Amino acid sequence: MEVIKSCSTMNGGCMHICNEDLGAISCSCSNGFQLEADGKSCSDVDECSDGTKCCDQGCSNTPGGYECSCRSGFTMLSDGCGCQDINECLDVNGGCDQQCVNSIGSYECTCDGGFVLTIDGKGCEPLPPVIVFRSKPK
Ligand SMILES: [Ca+2]
């Protein structure tokens, strides 16, 4: 077996970065990768599980990095880490006929007195006249 003594031959056997120092070769890895036990191979670091992630909510590991994500009802901050509630009421009143009430991660429509919410959760219709339910006569 040929002993590789230089980074100029086959990258010194290193998967990523070959360092030559006083005739000795050592391998290192690009950011987001870690050196394997063989001293040559590089494997992805799972930042989502090793505690280095900055994500408020979701985290997905990618080769050499990771990406944060936010649940529905939230928007990603420019830092790529934080998640901020979307105030749906600022956009066409959340689609609500009458009142729009924002909440963290969601919102709901409500109606003024004398009105009830329609089945779609957005519209308002006048309260129906009082209906008296009677049991069927036997
Ligand atoms: Ca919201």
Image: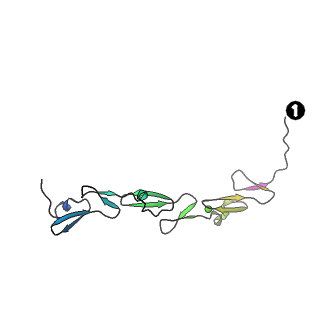
Q: Residue at x 23, y 60 (%)?
A: 14
Stretch of the chain drawn in magenta: 119-138
Q: Nearer the viewer, residue 137 or 31?
A: 31
| Badge 1 element | loop
Residue kind at label 1, given as amino acid type = Pro
Q: Please tell me which residue is depicted at 67% across the width and 60% down the height of the picture.
A: 95
Percent of width and height locating residue 109: 70, 58
Its colouring scheme is rainbow
**Could you say where residue 69 lies in the image, as x and y percent from the top left?**
49, 60
- Give the position of the C terminus as an image quadrant: top right
- Mark 1 highlights which residue? 137
Foreground residue, 100 or 95?
100
Residue 111's image quarter? bottom right
Magenta-highlighted stretch: main secondary structure? loop
Q: Quadrant of residue 131?
A: top right
Residue 110 visible in the snapshot: yes
Whole-percent x, y for residue 75 in the image = 54, 63
**Visible in this render: residue 7?**
no
Task: Locate residue 30 relative to residue 119 in the image: left or right.
Answer: left
Seen at 19% across and 64% down, the residue is: 25
